[in-house]
Amino acid sequence: MCLSNVFYIDSNGRQQEVMQDVAQMEAQDNGFLFIGLLGEQKFFQGEVRTIDFVNKHSVVLGINRTKHDQVSGASF
């Protein structure tokens, strides 16, 4: 069985794994709820950067650029 892992890219461009064995992903108002194989749930704010269902079985999230720019004035 091939389940996905979730990675998050922070404002400095660093990518880190934040969850393994994800069985379900649900879009919510300002982010995504991930549900693991054993029912573990984690919520992450941000936007989807990439999804790879074939090779890496991964979802990569990052800071929502539009909202982040409006709030902090940061540039990417």
Image (tube, rainbow, N blue to C red):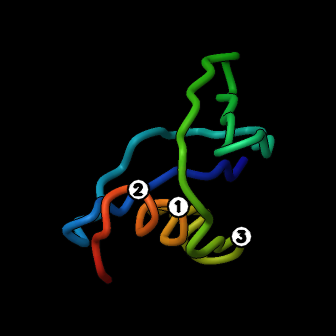
Near mark 3 (Cα within 10 A), the count class, few <14, some 14-19 or many ≥20, is few
* Place of residue 54 in the rendered image (x, y in percent of width and height, measured from the top left): 69, 75
* Viewport quadrant of the C terminus: bottom left
* Kind of residue indicated by mark 2: Val
Viewer-nearest of labels 3 and 2? 2
Front one among 14 and 24: 14
* Place of residue 20 in the rendered image (x, y in percent of width and height, measured from the top left): 50, 40
* Kind of residue indicated by mark 1: Lys
Q: What residue appears at the point 54 percent right and 70 percent down from the top-left corner? A: 66
Near mark 2 (Cα within 10 A), the count class, few <14, some 14-19 or many ≥20, is few
Front one among 66 and 55: 66
The residue tagged 3 is 53
The residue tagged 2 is 71
Q: What residue appears at the point 62 percent right and 66 percent down from the top-left corner? A: 48
Q: Is residue 60 left or right of residue 53?
A: left
Q: Are the residues tagged 2 and 1 within 8 Å (C-beta)?
A: yes
